[in-house]
Image (cartoon, coloured by chain):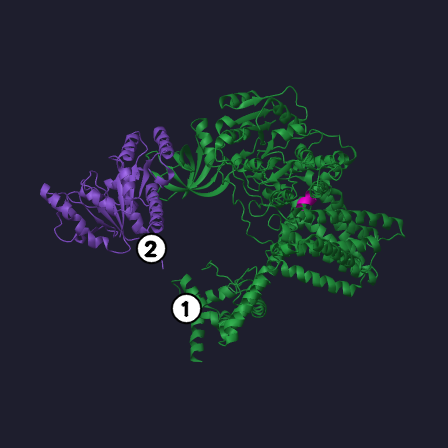
Amino acid sequence: MNMLHFQWRQARQTMTRVQATLHLMGLYSEVLLFRSDFTRDRAHAQAISASGSEPQETSKSLRYWFPQVDFSRLKPLDPLRIFIQLMWLVFVKSPDEEPATNRRIFKETSNVFRRAHRSGTSLVNHKVAPFLTQKATSVIHAFGEVSHYNWLNTPLIRVGLTMLAAFLVALTITLPMDAASQAVMLLFFWGVALWVRDVQKRGAMLLMVVLSVLVSTRYLYWRVTQTINWDIPLDTLLSLILLSAEIYAWSILILGYIQTIWPLERKVARLPDNPREWPTVDIYIPSYNEPLNVVKPAVLAALAMDWPQDKLRVYLLDDGRRPEFALFAQENGVNYMVRPDNSHAKAGNLNHALKKTSGDYIAIFDCDHIPARSFLQLTMGWFMEEPKLALVQTPHHFFSPDPFEKNLSMFRNKPNEGELFYGLIQDGNDMWNASFFCGSCAVLKRGPLEEVGGIAVETVTEDAHTALKMHRLGYTSAYLNIPQAAGLATESLSAHIGQRMRWARGMAQIFRLDNPLRGKGLNLGQRICYANAMLYFLNGLPRLIFMLAPLAFLLLHAYIVFAPAIMIAMYALPHIIHAYLTNSRTQGRFRHSFWAEMYETVLSWYILKPTTVALFFPKHGKFNVTAKGGITERTYFDWDVSRPYVILVLLSLLGFGFGVWRLLTGPSDEYLTVVLNLVWVTYNLIILGGAVAVAEEAKQVRSSHRIRVERRISIMTSSEHVFQADLIDYSDTGAGLRVPESCPLETGDVVRILLADGLEQHAFKAQIVNRRDQSIGVLFQFEGIENEQAFLRSTFSRADAWVGWRSMEEQERPMKSFREVIAIGLRGYKRMAKQFAPYMLPLFTLLERLGNFLRSLMPQLPEYKEENDG
Amino acid sequence: MRVVGIEGLCGGVGATSVAAGLAVALNEMAVRTIALDLNAQNHLGLLFGMPLEQLEGLVNQPGPLVNSVLETHEGYPFMPMGVARSVQERARFEASFAQRMEPILATKERILVVDAPAAPGPLREWLDIHADLMIHVIQPEPRAVPALLAFERDRMPQQEASGRRARILINGVAPHLQLANDMLVFLQSEIHRDRLVPVVIHRDQHVAEAFAKQQPLVSYQYEAQAARDYDALALWLIGYLAQHDHTDATQPHGAS
């Protein structure tokens, strides 16, 4: 009691009565609840605060357990926060659990076994238990490992298993059930999917895919057989429209699973040891209207590639016929080529060069793609291994943010739009020998290319079509997922949309003119992969249908899914949940859930028209060139681009209002239907908000993009003092460095930046343009073209320049992504309010505050925080 | 004691500076290292702050050699050569050196960085026998070519015959000078990569200034690039010594 009194007095010296009470209560509950950890944590707390009086230290260890509460400045609701956190810590989270362990189940199970082993002394504990432990853990660890089952691979067993599986699948899909048994079955499926979600084995992934396919197919079967209302013509029409969109979504889902089920992850193949046996390569760099400063780095880097100089020829194919390009090419030993007309745009340009050159292989780079010096050495090996190989494609990597990344400021911390394709889909295609040509950063073999008549000119996506033609002739293709060239992403949302419109139209054209599902020469996998690539771009109409579908009921009172609401929930929700879970498992590293929805929603309206036109008139339309390398002087909102989405938003809001009205006035048996549709329309509103938010063009003032790195370099002053420094970022014209405090450099000084490139050392003259503390900015003053080339080789075209660009460690969580998308959606609405109804802005501020407040009530993982208050 | 000899392939390539820089960097990494001067020029001590007028050293030491270990302010141990007062004194020293070094060599977990004698003689013979590694310093300049040819003719066959290990270190790299840079590329292409230390030392005005100030480079300018290069060299050397010959594994102190 005496001690309590002493502590009370001590606490009262610095706190009010209420604070002191809370403080002591917290202190004692901590001792009681987390006794075992207490001394250790105190030691830690003491270690991090070497100097500090007693009460501060305790408040620090309290802060560990209650990171959301600031004990020196308590707020009215903090007791509630403490209570929630306490309940969560005691009943939900076990104290010794490591945060974010992926294989918790395994660890806990094996811990149980190990503990049992340690505690006893009998023979059982010494001999039997370890054996069982080992057996059990090996079984658990091997779960989902499929490579051990080779002995099952005999024709008889295969046929038998397939028939059995087909029977079971048919049963699962078609068996009619009432709501309760349906719920039980699907809960079981869901449980299994959640259980194996974190198992990093292919078998576990296959299981999730199978479950998702079963659930989705069962849903579709039910939709087709039982939910069409044939009595009211309008309802019938609308429900058939929705059904066709759902069939489309289902086929894309299934095709996508097949396409990416087993990514090949091809490695580099070795070249012959003697460079004299290496083949000759022509490098084509087509250009049309890009400025010279964009093209120059690509050409110089191509010239500097590691390949025998007598076997490497670089061609600058200029459809713009610009004299400064001719001069630049002449000065640098590049072959400059123009043609009499510009027929067939890029494809025609490449074909013209194909006729005039003779290299065994042709590497093609868009004129803004700077190849790595190692590009040919890494890609050419496969041609030596596989005589039938006609194409090696590498990813398109962008060192500038695309409009999504720029406008939502997510550059390099979230997977971008292209990452799914180059990270996963092309690797999946490669498994089926169906990875296709993407127009740049690829090597083609001359023979097969000439056999198909050069680059295809019938469609506007000449690249994919050329690959398709070569596959039809029995040639193979390879995809090497190592970024070996980097370029500029599209600069604005409208340019981005323009590019995607071209792809969509081209893919639809190929689908009509040279349908991969028909015709000779392709295997089933290739047909599926190509078909999926083309069908994917037809998503415009289905997506709009999904956006409008809930309005059919809310506005028109049309029952487009003719079933009780409870049954719809029982069938549709599992279908959606499984699809999200499985996609998050298969593609989570390359695309986060819900972000894809946003990307595709933005494009859907715009690709609708070109794809529809191309499906009916495939020969119509011309090639457009994507604008790159520009600047955006100030932030502005592109209302033209977002107009269709604003209209959809207004319609949805109207629907929402009608829904609320129906809820208040309608018959009670419709409640659940109304609620379902309201949920749907809310989801649409969130995604649409995101689509609108993207249209806010963030400003981009530098004309050359700075690439963020962290690299040790040296800097030499004009007095030849050399200092170690860190390269923070670089572009083709300047760089940012961190130099030691004692380095006597000022704005205006001329220095030399020393960069190593393998064994070679290079010095680059540069002038300091600004200095703030340790950071300086420099602009390069290259001494001649060779110097500039050396700079490219030691920065942009280093073999490892783009390796580890974005951390791929993060395990994607759908719910977290959903929260992020909601936040972006809100941003879109705030922007709309600012434009159309400024008096509503306080509402959004209020909403944001409410969100932050609710989040502060949630329990949080205990963590040590830096002391940030006095 | 592991012995590492530093020897210039020709005069004035900065072997003494490298020896001092390496010894300091190793000590900074908590690998106890003594810098030993066997070069008659008696320059190594100056790099550790020894006053110019001090001419005493190993060569004048009648008692145990340990007595001539000096230390800098920072605690880096070094053994200056000293200046012999007579030819006889020097001859006596050279004759008794091998035997008198034995107690020092018997010390465990130490590295001895030796600034090698420029001329052949008993001291160099001793070094050739005891060195775990000889590092031959060269600069990227035209003089390097004849020096390298002479090395290949004379020292290299001897070393290979006796099984001694040797590496060549390029000092004074100056990427901004055309000739120096071309010579660097030439040397890197001519010398087999197994014979080359995978670290280069930059030409840095800080080195000369530190000498003028009679301070170890790190004390004079911690951020100097050459100091970081010596760190890299030390790191490489620790790895090299740990990999070759396990009789006396060198571990940084306090690592366990």
Task: Find out whether residue B245 is within the magenta segment.
Answer: no
Q: Is residue B132 above or below residue A185?
A: above
Q: Nearer the viewer, residue A75 or B38?
A: B38
Q: Is residue A332 above or below residue A605?
A: above
Callout 1: chain: A
Can you tell which mark lies on residue B251?
2
From this viewpoint, which residue is outermost toward the bottom?
Answer: A1
Query: Is disc 2 placed on a helix, strand or loop?
Result: loop
Can you tell which mark lies on residue A329?
none
Extent of the magenta region: A598-602
Q: Which kind of residue does numbered mark 2 sit on?
A: Gln
Left/right placement of residue A415 relative to residue B234 reads right
**Residue A797: x and y, percent?**
50, 36
From this viewpoint, which residue is outermost toward the right?
Answer: A231
Query: Is disc 1 placed on a helix, strand or loop?
Result: helix
Q: Quadrant of the N terminus of chain A?
A: bottom left
Which of the 4 image quadrants contains residue A575? Answer: bottom right
Q: Circle 1 is placed at which residue position?
A: A54
Q: Which kind of residue does numbered mark 1 sit on?
A: Glu
Drawing shade for chain B: purple
Q: Is residue A71 visible?
A: no
Callout 2: chain: B
Drawing shade for chain A: green
Q: Is residue A726 above or below residue A513?
A: below
Residue at position x 13%, y 53% in the image? B63
Left/right placement of residue A387 relative to residue A523 reads left
**Residue A637: x and y, percent?**
64, 40
Residue at position x 53%, y 72% in the image? A128
Left/right placement of residue A276 relative to residue B137 reads right
Task: Find out whether residue A601 is within the magenta segment.
Answer: yes
The answer for how far apart the CA atoms under marks 2 and 1 are is: 41 Å
